[in-house]
Image: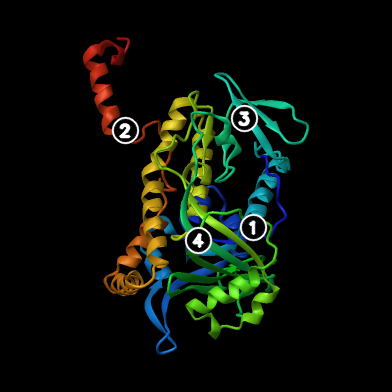
Amino acid sequence: MYEPELEPLGGGIQLNGGLASLASVLSSDEVSELLRVCVGMSGVISNTYVTEENEMDQLLSLDAEEALRRVDDLYLRELGVVSSVTILRSTLLKFLISKCEEKKKKGDGVEFELKEEKVVRVDARPEEVFVTTEGDGKEKAYDLVLGCDGLSSEVKSSLPELRSSSIYSGLRILYSVSEPYEWKGGGAAEGLGRKKKLRQFFGEGCYQLKGTYGYDSEKVCDMSAIVYKGNKRGENTAWEKEDLYEDFVRRSKLVGGSREDAADEKSSKFIELGVYFHNPFNKWSNDFNNVILAGDSAHAMPPFLGQGGNQGMQDGVMLGKLIGEGVEGEVLAKQFRRRWRKTTLITAKSIFLGYLETGGGKVADFRDNFFRFAGKVGLARKVFVDGATPFPSPREVWDGVGEVGLLEQLQLALQVVKDPTQFMDDE
């Protein structure tokens, strides 16, 4: 595993389908350990800021626990909780690395090495893949490379058949993450005894999401994200204040932020980024099927359904199970590509929501009415549950048979007609 930066606090993520998939490869004790550093996401409340009356108008209230409890793949029965939590990226990453290191020490057949180096080039050949890092500049050969290195993937950009430009959405996000503080709501030691709702605030031309995310078993962090339209420019990725605090306070007032205590944000770290996504018709594997892209490298999507981290987690679990069963080459690439439809649908819905939620004027009026309607008829719950439900199911076992598309069925039929004997037994 090549990972150049492990220290930054980073932002927070929602886990639902990703947690359910991860739970299928961890023991109950390990899942319980993970839940102790999470905050249970009990629901979502959406409000619009009515400036004329100087008050908030609630558009919908989604009970996440009730919605997910109905889905077998999202209900962790052994623990009696639904798969719906929030956690800081750095906390989740450190937990996963620690589990790999523990399994290696126990002699569980896990060979794991973490190198804090940056990949600068990948050269794929039919039999091997050569990786060059920033450190010593020497090539190292591998049988298979999984490129999970994000939107600006070096693995992806190194190979002509995988290379593609990210698409800028025209939307930007200003994140604020507080320093860790002790949980004051009770139930800190019980993991999901800590529960919070995510809150959305809609304004003219922008919206804000606020939530609390797990840092460790005793502490949490608050995160806020303000989304608005803006031109493409250089990204502030250093989590430094610079001029972002004043910008944050100014933009938060557009969604009723004047009602919040802005002084709390002075201790926060800030980052401002553009929202990008990938063309869904890009390839996920190279010509030799020994380089496979996953996560944001394969299907970067806007974050407005909270599914980027979840889909990356499901990618990893599915690839791990297939590789562990000895699946390789073209079969591995095709089986993994089954996830294309799921990620593409989520990307399309996220793009739609991003533009709708940041609308102004008549679009803002339509947005508010749409959210009221979606809450009343159950559409919001359906979209949430559909996105959260993992694919393939965590209970699915690799048996050598996967989904075959219509084109593949026709190709197979033509092969049978052309030479039936190749499909017969030796007898």
Q: Circle 1 sits on which residue?
A: 236
Alpha-carbon neighbours of circle 4 within 10 Å: few (<14), some, or many (≥20)?
few
- In the displayed structure, 185 sits above or below 9; it is below
Q: Nearer the viewer, residue 384 or 257?
A: 257
Left of 372 or right of it: where is 185?
right
Query: Helix, strand or loop at disc 4?
Result: loop
| Percent x, y of residue 399 | 40, 34
Q: Circle 3 sits on which residue?
A: 122
Q: CA distance from mark 4 to mark 2?
A: 42 Å
- Mark nearer the N terminus (4 vs 2): 4
Which label sits on residue 230? 4
- In the displayed structure, 118 sits above or below 143; it is below
Q: Is residue 153 visible?
A: yes
Q: Are marks 3 and 1 in contact (CB under 8 Å)?
A: no
Name the residue rendered at 34%, 70% in the picture. 367
Query: Helix, strand or loop at disc 2?
Result: loop
Name the residue rendered at 26%, 32% in the picture. 406
> Which amino acid, mark 1?
Asn
Q: Nearer the viewer, residue 373 or 71?
A: 373
Q: CA distance from mark 4 to mark 1?
A: 14 Å
Q: Nearer the viewer, residue 15 or 366?
A: 366
Q: Are marks 4 and 1 in contact (CB under 8 Å)?
A: no
Q: CA distance from mark 3 to mark 1?
A: 27 Å
Image quarter in which the N terminus is found:
top right
Q: Circle 2 sits on which residue?
A: 404
Q: Are marks 3 and 4 in contact (CB under 8 Å)?
A: no
